Image (cartoon, rainbow, N blue to C red):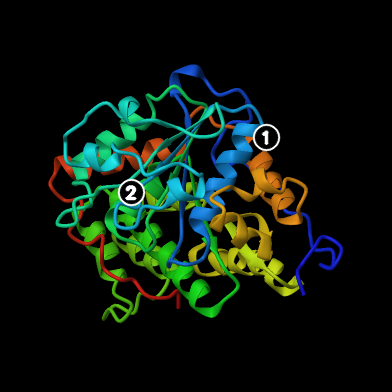
Amino acid sequence: MTVTSATIPKVPTIPTMAPAGQASDPHRPPSRGPRLLAIGSGKGGVGKTFVTANLATALARLGKRVVVVDADLDGANLHTCLGVPAPRRSLADFVSEREDDLGKLLVDTPLANLKLIGATHGNLADAQPSHLRRVRLLRGLRQLDADVVLIDLGAGADAAVLDYFLVSDDGILVLQPEPTSVENAYSFLRAAFYRRMRLAMVGHGVRQLVTLAMDQRNERGIRTPLDLLREIEATDTVEARRFVETMRLFRPRLIVNSARTAEDVKLGFAVCSVCKKFFGIDAEYLGYVNYDDEARRSVSMRRPIVDLHRDADVSIYLQRIARKLVEGPLAQSSPASEASAAIDRRRQTGDEDRHSTANPGGFA
């Protein structure tokens, strides 16, 4: 049975919340440039690109100037979901240093205030950007003439994906109510958390502790971030305070896609509860998108469902999430700025990627 607003029992309201540490002023300073939203997933096939394309379209229909970026250089298909022919020039040209001006890579879409930077024609031998190129990309995105920039990340938790997720103003994780998707979502969050922590720590010994904790079978018995905090407190109280503050600022957001039952809808709350218990962090459940065969047909027709069937339940839920993204309080200074500074520090010391691609496993 297809889930609709009438068939799903009432569940607790999902509040609109600003990331911890952010100011309540709803007006973003012009000097900050567009708001960056990075959308990732622990595994492929959960509908991440579908969600990204539809959120971008919904935001554009709300009057926002939107740029959507396909950062999946190994499997670019965002242009297809938006009904745009494969761009001749794309992010791959920036990665390969054939083009430094991101503005020249913008492609029109059927909506006047929605632009696309595709990822077609990538170099199969070396598709992913270097760390320095990633930093320049993120800086370039903040200089675009837009209100919102959405980044459709590749699936999984490699270094490039994690950096985009951490440095953006909001990192959004899409998952489906399936055991494999939930397991990989936990792995993604754990990898992002430890990368953030390792980048934020200043002391070499403490960074080594974080690296040790990334091995779930480490000999110190560090199994959770709270275990790690206790180890750091015994070593360096200043770094322990920095660790706690970084935990507070790490606030991933979740979207459950293809919800069929009330239990599927509640999955987002369950994942947030696990994040709190094992990480000591407050993840935010943005909302869910119900399963609908029309959504699959919209992809086949190369049109976003919020454009094709605006009154369908799946469209209503997507538009609700889009409104939540723009109506919540925006920061004058976001946690992203601290993550960006930390990544720059590691680049300068040549210590950025050596431990970033290790598979960190589950939570406990």
Residue type at tag 2 = Asp
What's the residue at 50%, 50% (across, down)?
81
Mark 2 crowd level (few <14, some 14–19, many ≥20, 10 Å Cα) = many
**In the image, residue 169 above or below residue 294:** above
Residue type at tag 1 = Glu
What's the residue at 64%, 42% (across, down)?
322
What's the residue at 44%, 24% (across, down)?
33
Mark 1 crowd level (few <14, some 14–19, many ≥20, 10 Å Cα) = few
Q: What percent of the width, then of the height, locates residue 149?
A: 47, 35
Q: Earlier in the sequence, mark 1 or mark 2?
A: 2
Which residue in the protein does label 1 denote?
327
- Check contact, mark 1 vs mark 2: CB within 8 A: no
What's the residue at 57%, 47% (across, down)?
303
| Nearer to me, 211 or 173 | 173
Q: Which mark is residue 163?
A: 2
**In the image, residue 142 above or below residue 345:** above
In the image: residue 66, left or right of residue 327: left
Which quarter of the figure is the N terminus placed in?
bottom right
Q: What percent of the width, then of the height, locates residue 119?
A: 33, 46
**In the image, residue 324 above or below residue 51:** above
| Nearer to me, 67 or 142 | 67
| Nearer to me, 146 or 310 | 310
Residue 321 visible from this viewpoint: no
Which quarter of the figure is the C terminus placed in?
bottom left
Q: Which mark is residue 350?
A: none
Residue 41 visible from this viewpoint: yes
User: What secondary structure is marked by label 2?
Assistant: helix
